């Protein structure tokens, strides 16, 4: 049995980022519960830098173990971006992408709620709405629906809020609320941004209508041979996330959503999708269709993809001082909206949906250039063994 507190201490002693070490250990714990393996299989995985259950998830063998990005080494690389990381703060990103052909990729930004609860009104705040205690309600009456999200972290546990006015009824994340709850949200938000709500394309709503499909596209900057040439970028991971009836219909995989990989050049879906095993009562985490609507992914693809793909390339060129971008995108009827850019996104089930990362030459070159193999996976194995009770 693993003592995760001991393992956490040992990961920090190994030099893993303080905050990320907690996430690393939590994900290892989840892995052990989802994919129990033998002691021999666990040792094999750990000695190569992987969580034990990757033997089952990836089908790890001596022949293919070097095709996959190892968990320990990936976490040890944090942070992958340089000091321009501050650009990825959600509010700052709005200003950063307000030029260079990227202006249309960001939703309208109406207000920022400061740490003391005061409102700072942003560039897209409607001028005719009085800036007073009733601002949020009056903005909601004008727009009908709003997106409200932490600028960073979880900001007190409220998380993402979809706030709607349906006739005279208030709704929070597709559930009716009363005025007392509305006032609680308004008065407890801290470090929050209030923005336009981006509606997904109708083709995506046909697959799952109760929450927006979000794309995750991870782009890496290719190592340069000539220091003076413009930066070029390659796609490491590209997949779409759809909500399900599990846990209120959220699209993120950690809440029970379904993910399906797609080809970055064409936008065509892969033949299968996945969901986290803990949300699969029959243990079958590979799916050929949406579990609620029965939409079959094989042969179908994303709407507006050529336009979205080109905008992703515009964004990469515009923020090319960064090296590693996990873009979250909603495809709309006439284009796209960027929800956020993650600086060090997950890379586990992604390698099932989108193929082994290290088999892609440009992606392998990126991680090798970042020093992926400067970290000895034997450190993880020893720390794990010393954490057993």
Image (cartoon, helix red, strand yellow):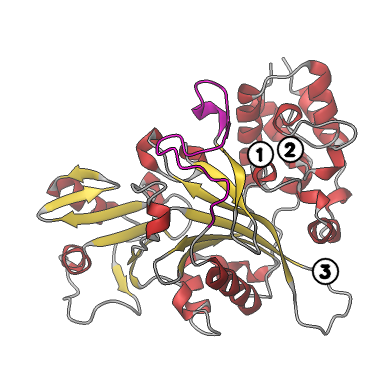
Label 2 crowd (10 A; few <14 / some 14-19 / many >=20): many
Which numbered circle lies on residue 296?
none
Residue tagged 3: 223
User: Which residue is drawn at the image coordinates 83% and 85% (left, top)?
Assistant: 228
Residue tagged 2: 11
Q: Judge by depth and name the residue closer to the eye, 114 or 2.
A: 2
Q: Judge by depth and name the residue closer to the eye, 175 or 199.
A: 199
User: Which residue is drawn at the image coordinates 72% and 40% (left, top)?
Assistant: 12
Left or right: residue 280 versus residue 118 is right
Mark 2 or 3 closer to N-term? Answer: 2
Mark 2 and mark 1 in contact? Answer it, CB < 8 Å. yes
Q: Position of residue 385 (x, y in %)?
A: 80, 22
Mark 2 or 1 closer to N-term? Answer: 2
Q: Nearer the viewer, mark 2 or mark 1?
A: 1
Q: Which residue range is magenta in the image?
A: 276-301
Mark 3 or 1 closer to N-term? Answer: 1
Q: Secondary structure at mark 1?
A: helix
């Amino acid at each position: 049995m693993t003592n995760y507190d001991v393992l956490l201490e040992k990961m920090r002693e190994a030099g893993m980022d303080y905050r990320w070490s907690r996430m690393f250990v939590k994900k290892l714990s989840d892995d052990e519960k989802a994919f129990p393996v033998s002691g021999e299989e666990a040792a094999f995985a750990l000695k190569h830098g992987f969580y034990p259950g990757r033997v089952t998830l990836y089908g790890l063998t001596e022949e293919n173990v070097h095709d996959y990005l190892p968990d320990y080494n990936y976490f040890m690389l944090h942070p992958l971006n340089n000091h321009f990381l501050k650009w990825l703060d959600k509010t700052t990103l709005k200003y950063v992408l307000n030029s260079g052909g990227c202006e249309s990729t960001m939703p309208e930004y109406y207000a920022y709620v400061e740490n003391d609860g005061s409102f700072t009104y942003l560039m897209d705040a409607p001028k005719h709405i009085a800036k007073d205690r009733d601002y949020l309600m009056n903005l909601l009456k004008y727009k009908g629906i709003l997106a409200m999200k932490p600028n960073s972290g979880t900001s007190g546990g409220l998380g993402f809020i979809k706030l709607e006015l349906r006739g005279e009824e208030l709704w929070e994340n597709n559930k009716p609320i009363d005025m007392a709850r509305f006032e609680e949200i308004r008065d407890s938000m801290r470090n929050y941004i209030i923005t336009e709500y981006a509606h997904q394309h109708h083709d995506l709503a046909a697959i799952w209508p109760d929450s927006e499909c979000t794309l995750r596209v991870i782009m890496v900057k290719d190592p340069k041979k000539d220091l003076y040439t413009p930066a070029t970028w390659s796609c490491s991971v590209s997949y779409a996330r759809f909500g399900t009836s599990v846990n209120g219909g959220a699209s993120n995989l950690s809440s029970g959503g379904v993910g399906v990989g797609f080809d970055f050049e064409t936008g065509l879906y892969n033949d299968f999708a996945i969901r986290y095993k803990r949300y699969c009562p029959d243990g079958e985490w590979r799916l050929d269709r949406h579990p609620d609507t029965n939409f079959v992914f094989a042969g179908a693809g994303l709407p507006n993809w050529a336009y979205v793909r080109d905008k992703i390339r515009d964004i990469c060129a515009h923020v090319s001082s960064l090296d590693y971008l996990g873009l979250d995108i909603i495809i709309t009827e006439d284009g796209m909206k960027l929800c956020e850019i993650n600086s060090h996104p997950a890379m586990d089930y992604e390698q099932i949906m989108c193929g082994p990362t290290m088999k892609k030459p440009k992606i392998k070159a990126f991680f090798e250039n970042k020093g992926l193999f400067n970290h000895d996976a034997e450190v993880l194995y020893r720390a794990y063994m010393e954490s057993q009770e």
